[in-house]
Amino acid sequence: MSTDLTRRTAAELAASIASGEVSALEVTQAHLDRIGKVDEKVNAFLHVDTEGALSAARAVDAKRAKGERLGPLAGVPLALKDLFTTRGIPTTCGSKILEGWLPPYDATVTRRLREADVVILGKSNMDEFAMGSSTENSAYGPTRNPWDLERIPGGSGGGSAAALAAFEAPLAIGTDTGGSIRQPGAVTGTVGVKPTYGGVSRFGMVAFSSSLDQGGPCARTVLDAALLHEVIAGHDPLDSTSIDAPVPGVVAAAEAGAREGIKGLRVGVVKQLAGEGYQAGVMQRFEESVALLRELGAEVVEVDCPSFAYALPAYYLIAPSECSSNLARFDAMRYGLRVGDNGEHSAEEVTALTREAGFGAEVKRRIMLGTYALSSGYYDAYYGQAQKVRTLITRDFDAAFGRVDVMVSPTTPTTAFKIGERADDPMAMYLADLCTIPTNLAGNAGMSLPCGLAPEDGLPVGLQILAPAMADDRLYRVGAALEAALLAQWGRPMLDAVPAL
């Protein structure tokens, strides 16, 4: 076990705190010191809650001293995506329009983290209102990938993923509307999980696209992600889309996968998520991982999902349509920024001036696209057709999962691209989520875990595992088995190769 507290896994830290080897205060201070040392270069955090984190850590140490029961992640620090409301702590969603807003309540995810004695270090950077694939669209500057500071850390949860890869936090929370947990996980060499839609409460998670948004865990190992998953998941009566059913046993599944492997499991390789446009090094590492799954005892077959070819255009009609409705609430009357309120403008003009000043270019682009798609005379032609495609994609998944237990693909077509490289080409940017979007449209569960470095650029490659709705435990079983086999090959965690910052 490393003597550097910032290099330990969340499971190791929790065990060390519970045994009294180290205090939660020491662990928290070590991570705050790391943030102070490197975050000026990475920009993973929008707000660091130093006093709140130290206070929470002291409370954990006091509970332990009294012999009170501690949660499985008590005292472990975490970075929380700035999309979740935090009472008394700024929540901006990476947007100027919410600058300075202090929510009066906690999101359910935030509340569950606090109740489990997890130490929230602060709020992590993100593309504005989760709209982007690179974290270049934050109003507070881009986050940089710790593997190469000139490259993107993925989006929209680039801050959460970069905080893990820069050893600023052992755990993080993200949200996944079209891949915003898995895609940043892939390009930073970390683990990201999109739970089944409705598996984690969306109450207090600022809405981008309500039928697609899903909060989930980010970590450096599969077991750490599973431990965090069980803390935040479960039915919430405050969220009408929350699933009222027991949470799958993901921690037990991760432990079983690492210990027993996956002999007899049926794995489907998605025919449509490969080929032209995929980086050679990404495909090489993916194919090596599939071969390893065979060696671990899995039965591997190819599965055909023809409607996946239409997932990207369907997503970019459904998501902007829902965002144009959800973001209508930011009207200068309720939250944060207000521009032109000097007695010379009408309420409508103040709203227009505030939205013009407060929203960034990508948010405006999607609001306009969505408003057009929902407008009279075009609803059936665009939004209605996209929803029909969504049904076809769900049927493809259902048919495939009738043959296999899980499906796999590369998480992203390429490794991390350079900051600014796709800034003027929205379609090229949108292709970064090509492999992840179908899962969101169907509401299934997905995971990305690191499967090696691409030989041509030395950057992380992610492997995506997909499972049916409410079968999240299968992700963890397969992920843990593959992670253990890869670790045995590499001899050390892949993140140990991150350059010094």
Image (cartoon, helix red, strand yellow):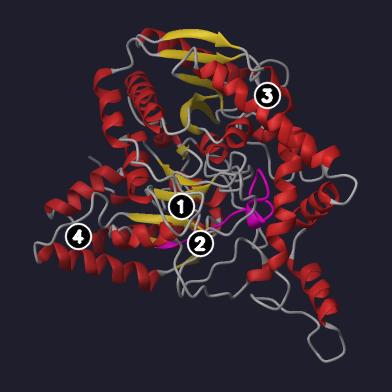
Q: Disc 1 versus disc 2: distance between alpha carbons?
A: 8 Å
User: Which residue sits at x=86%, y=50%?
Assistant: 372
Numbered disc 1: secondary structure: loop
The reply to whether the magenta stretch includes residue 129 is yes
Residue type indicated by callout 1: Ser
Q: Are marks 1 and 2 in contact (CB under 8 Å)?
A: yes
Q: Residue 490: give x, y in percent of width and height.
A: 37, 22
Residue type indicated by callout 4: Ser
Q: Which residue corresponds to mark 2?
A: 204
The disc, 1 or 4, on the residue closer to the chain's N-terminal end is: 4
Image-quadrant location for residue 341: bottom right
Between marks 2 and 4 in the image, the one whose residue lies nearer the viewer = 2
Between marks 3 and 4 in the image, the one whose residue lies nearer the viewer = 3
Q: Disc 3 versus disc 4: distance between alpha carbons?
A: 49 Å
Residue type indicated by callout 3: Phe
User: Which residue sits at x=19%, y=47%?
Assistant: 15
Q: Quick one: label 1, few (<14), some, or many (20+) residues within 10 Å?
A: many
Q: Residue 387: give x, y in percent of width and height.
A: 72, 36
Q: Which residue corresponds to mark 1?
A: 201
Q: Disc 3 versus disc 1: distance between alpha carbons?
A: 27 Å
The disc, 2 or 4, on the residue closer to the chain's N-terminal end is: 4
Q: Disc 1 versus disc 4: distance between alpha carbons?
A: 31 Å
Residue 23: mark: 4
Q: Quick one: label 4, few (<14), some, or many (20+) residues within 10 Å?
A: many
